[in-house]
Amino acid sequence: MTEPLSLAGRTGIVTGLANEDSIAFGCARALHDAGADLILSYGHPKGEPHVRPLAEQLGDPPLILCDVREQDQFEALFGAAEQRWGRLDFVIHSMAFAPRDDLHGRVVDSSRDGFLLAMDISCHSFMRMARLAEPLMKEGGCLITMSYYGAEKVVDNYGIMGPVKAALEASVRYMAEELGPAGIRVHAISPGPIATRAASGIQDFDQLLHQAEERAPTRRLVTIDEVGTTARFLISDAARSITGVTTYVDGGLHVRA
């Protein structure tokens, strides 16, 4: 009998690799360990020295620059998957960005350009990935993005990323409905605070980490590897009847008032 959590023979793209602390790396490591064949992407040329050694730890899969604002790079990433495998089983969307001034200011004071940029990179890029992945997911597949509790409740200093992540989670539900008939499942994972490079841009982030550790029922912070094993489960056959939901990996922090 096939192990239900095995990903042997599965093919997929993990985006947003930045360094060894990035959620994307935790996901890539868990999926690689489960037997999946990967393509990895990173978002800026300056990141290559940091991500190349990580790819080597994972069997040296293709590592492709993909700034999601550049359509040609977007298409090249999925073209590489088509050329390598002729199909695709999963995509991990692990990226978020907001200009510092807009992130640190009030939502009502956010600039139009800053808000649109945050929405484009953090939310709409997931829809564009889905559009490129759909024709390659000939026998179904799984799309996963990363959210945060600030999409549901007000979190101090999370600013415009709260509305952006709320839009992302709503998109997951609509995409699950639209792509479900093709056997494509869509998920958001909502990790608790993790000390990633992207999260470090949040004002007073160390305080947020401390509060999470104190308030979570498990009384500890979660790790990128725990997020990765959750992604592995959602991609696997064990989760074949689950779609359109936000899965919290936060030690139960989201249940606290």
Image: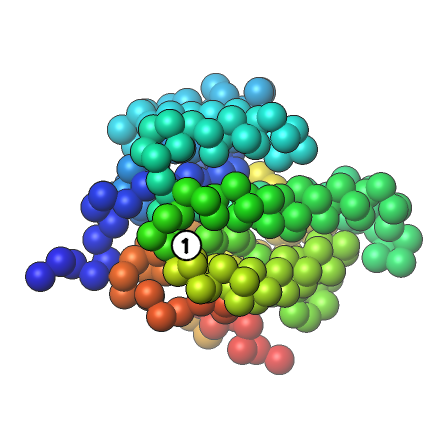
Residue 173, quarter of the rendered image: bottom right
Residue drawn at x 54%, y 78% is 255
* Foreground pick, 61 / 81: 81
Left of 212 or right of it: where is 203? right
Position of residue 14 relative to residue 80, above or below, is below
Residue 87, quarter of the rendered image: top left
- Callout 1 secondary element: strand
Quick check: can you spot residue 169?
no
Left of 182 or right of it: where is 237? left
Quick check: can you spot residue 48?
yes
Q: Quarter of the image containing the N terminus? A: bottom left
* Foreground pick, 142 / 215: 142
Residue drawn at x 21%, y 46% is 8
Residue drawn at x 39%, y 60% is 183
According to the picture, the residue beneath numbered tag 1 turns out to be 142
Residue 31: % across, % down: 31, 46
* Foreground pick, 10 / 83: 83
How packed is label 1: few (under 14 Cα within 10 Å), some, or many (20 or more)? Answer: many
Q: Quarter of the image containing the C terminus? A: bottom right
* Foreground pick, 72 / 96: 72
Left of 14 or right of it: where is 35? left
Residue 67, quarter of the rendered image: top right
* Residue furthest to the left: 1
Residue 214: % across, % down: 53, 67
Q: Amino acid at mark 1?
A: Cys
